[in-house]
Image: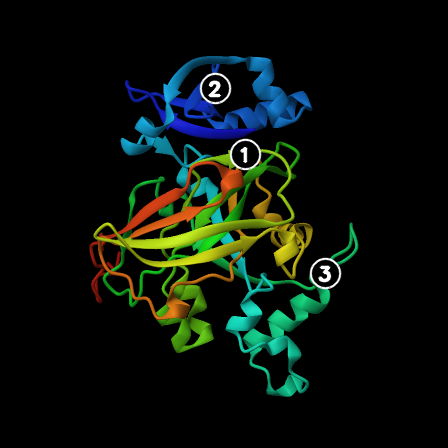
């Protein structure tokens, strides 16, 4: 089952089940978060909760996408109660982009980045119920940084790059029992500043404080072991870059269980009712192929198992915060 959140013609929120070219409204549902919390309370799965409510009116999916009426597939009415985060160096394909570091014999010659990748290859998939090596982790922001499918990414005036990162994200709600419940998975664009990151790996935290997008659909249930999709960039309607986008545990050096454990082991991330969007990493970047994006460029990330592609474009700069503008009280 794949779910979307959307705005009706009168501006009200709805939840829909994807049925081919149509969306069928889930009766009485106004958000996927509310559906998930109701399922937790009833002790049933999300799909069972949807089926218990039943389906109503149909809507043309393509029209809603074109009119920017599709919302992120999971959110929170208070953006401060959303945490957007991610993990890096998690996909086996990144080895080729990092000079095949896992074949290096002298660990002392490795950079810290390469060393963490090597640890993941060796210990990122522990036995079920056990903790493996912890991955690289980063914070992107709260829900205010999320851009809906089809919309433009704002670019800070201090940004040095505006690059895509095609990823799969896990979507979670924290239950009343302070336990994380996975709602499902979505295609994401973990938009980042790669020039800033490349200057020094300690700038990674700065480079990740950008907008992001995910959806338009959330896939309920388990993630397929192997996923093969496409990431591409269009400029003035012409394709300027395309590459295969691989994901799923068969293409990763960490298990999803291990990545989830090392995120939710922190008690401050287990506040009942909160929403978490956690990106699982990628091995595909246009930046690695020498592409430099510009305002108006369009990102398109496709994975057949997730339905409609995620499309966003590079927007204009945000308003600048100037030095010396902190006010003393």
Determine whether 258 is above or below 322 in the image: above
Reading the chain from its start, which is encountered first: label 2 or label 3? 2
**Distance (Cα) linking label 2 and label 1:** 17 Å
Tags 2 and 1 touching, CB below 8 Å: no
Residue topped by disc 1: 273
Residue 305 seen: yes
Labels 3, 1: front one: 3
Reading the chain from its start, which is encountered first: label 3 or label 1? 3
Judging depth in this view, the residue of 272 and 214 nearest the camera is 214
**Distance (Cα) linking label 2 and label 3:** 38 Å
Residue topped by disc 3: 132
Determine whether 68 is above or below 48 in the image: below
Q: Residues within 10 Å of mark 1 (few under 14, many from 20)?
A: many
Residue 265 seen: no
The quadrant the N terminus occupies is: top right
Residue topped by disc 2: 29
């Amino acid at each position: 089952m794949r779910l979307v959140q959307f705005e009706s013609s009168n501006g009200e929120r709805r939840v829909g089940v994807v049925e081919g070219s149509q969306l069928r409204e889930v009766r009485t549902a106004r958000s996927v978060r509310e559906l998930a919390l109701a399922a937790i309370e009833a002790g049933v799965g999300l799909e069972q909760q949807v089926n218990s409510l039943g389906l109503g009116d149909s809507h043309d999916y393509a029209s809603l996408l074109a009119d920017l009426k599709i919302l992120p597939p999971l959110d929170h009415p208070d953006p401060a109660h959303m945490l957007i985060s991610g993990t890096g160096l998690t996909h086996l394909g990144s080895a080729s982009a990092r000079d095949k570091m896992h074949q290096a014999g002298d660990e002392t010659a490795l950079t810290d980045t390469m060393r963490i990748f090597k640890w993941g290859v060796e210990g990122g998939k522990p036995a079920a119920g056990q903790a493996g090596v912890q991955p690289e982790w980063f914070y992107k922001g709260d829900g205010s940084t999320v851009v809906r499918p089809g919309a433009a990414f704002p670019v800070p005036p201090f940004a040095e790059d505006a690059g895509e990162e095609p990823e799969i994200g896990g979507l979670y709600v924290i239950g009343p029992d302070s336990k994380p419940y996975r709602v499902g998975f979505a295609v994401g664009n973990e938009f980042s500043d790669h020039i800033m990151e490349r200057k020094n790996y300690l700038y990674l935290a700065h480079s990740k404080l950008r907008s992001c997008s995910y959806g338009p659909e959330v896939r309920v249930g388990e993630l397929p072991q192997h996923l093969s999709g496409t990431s591409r960039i269009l400029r003035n309607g012409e394709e300027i870059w395309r590459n295969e986008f691989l994901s799923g545990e068969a293409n990763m050096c960490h298990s999803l269980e291990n990545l989830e454990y090392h995120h939710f082991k922190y008690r401050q991330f287990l506040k009942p009712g909160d929403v978490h969007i956690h990106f699982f990493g990628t091995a595909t970047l246009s930046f690695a192929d020498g592409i430099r994006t510009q305002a108006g460029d369009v990102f398109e990330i496709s994975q057949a198992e997730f339905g409609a592609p995620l499309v966003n474009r590079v927007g204009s700069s945000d308003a600048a915060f100037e030095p010396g503008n902190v006010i003393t009280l």
